[in-house]
Image (tube, rainbow, N blue to C red):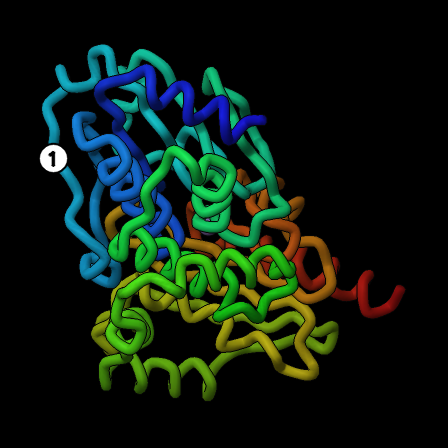
Amino acid sequence: MVQKAILEKIKSYETIIIHHHVSPDPDCIGSQLGLKYLLLASYPDKKVYAVGTHVDRTRFLGELDVIEDDVYKDALVVIVDVGDKKRIDDDRFVLGKELIKIDHHPLTEAFCQLEWVDTKYAACCEMIIDFYVVNKNELVMTDVAAKNLYAGLLTDTGRFYYNSVTERTLRYGAIVYQFGFDKQDLYANLYYKSIHELKFMGYIMANFKYTENGLGYMKITQEILDEFEVTTDFASGMVNTLGNIKEIVMWMFFTADKKLGKIRTSFRSRGPIVNKLAAKYGGGGHVWASGTLAESWELVDKIIHDADLLCKEYVGG
Ligand SMILES: [Mn+2]
């Protein structure tokens, strides 16, 4: 059983370093810190580090560690919630002695000694809870680990709403929910909006574009981000504002990313399969939720054209 094999590996190391993906979301940080706190409570003598860059929205979940290169010597590296090597935050993951991957995105490349990749989990946090359930006799769950894991479950399932949710997801939600963390405080931190953000949502609702084939999309340039004083992370995270619209089967957000000098592209669908389209443009992800980075706004128009054809096939067929 892979959950047991992972625990055996962890037990054989003194130092464990956990990596997340670039622009981490709450499922990514939640599984990273959830695993860290779970291991620290279970094995107080081990050194467990969670590394990478924080984004403002998830800082409340807990601090990340800053470590020197030599800590990687003889360390086990665990990578969570990332399918591709190039999306891992902090390339020093290669310095570890051995690598483990725990992920629920479709497998694109295997590069670890031990890979637990399973798309049937709605969240990477659901996998970490599963790891805990299978190894319950040896692991100690804590309030702060449970809070992190619940945060990822909530957000990656749209509060237990997406079609990735199974009976197991709900059961595992209940397992961590019973721990003593402040639920209202967690919801407030996960779901608050600033007035700028609210006005930006109003702008999306008034200005999104759509085609007769059921494609909805929004282009968010740097000028728009500046005008509404919202970040690229927040703006691209608003993609599901175009979900749940009767006439729209597929919806996309194109958001300028000043840091990368590219355009962050998110595909969502309740019909056409979108990860093949994302793959065609160098990205990847889930069947109904994927993304890529586009080099230019000209390329964005090509993607919109292709996406509209997919919608036409889907609606027409
Ligand atoms: Mn995830």
Residue 15's place in the image compared with 138, above or below, is above
Residue 50 quadrant:
top left
Residue at far right of view: 317
* Quadrant of the drawing holding the C terminus: bottom right
Regarding residue 23, the answer to whether it shows in the image is: no
Q: Pick whichever, 74 or 82, lies toward us.
A: 74
Whether residue 223 is situated above or below residue 96 in the rendered picture:
below
Can residue 195 be seen here? The reply is yes
User: Label 1 neighbourhood size at 10 Å, few (<14), some (14-19), many (20+)?
Assistant: few
Which residue lies most toward the front here?
137
3 or 107, which is in the foreground?
3
Left or right position of 49 against 28: left
The structure residue drawn at horizontal position 43% and vertical position 80%, both measured from the top left corner, is 204
Residue 40 in the image: x percent, y percent?
A: 23, 37
Percent coordinates x, y for residue 240 in the rendering: 51, 71
Q: Report which residue position mark 1 lands on.
A: 66
Residue drawn at x 65%, y 63% is 163
Indicate the secondary structure of the residue bearing disc 1. Answer: loop
Number of labels in the image equals: 1
Expressed as whole percent of the image width and height from the top left, the position of residue 140 reads 32, 42
Residue in view at x 52 percent, y 63 percent = 157
In the picture, measured across the screen, residue 27 lies left or right of residue 75, that is right
Amino acid type, callout 1: Val
Task: Name the residue rendered at 35%, 23% in the picture.
Answer: 10
| Camera-nearest residue between 241 and 147 | 147
Residue 172 place in picture, x, y as percent:
51, 56
**Quadrant in the picture for the N terminus:** top right
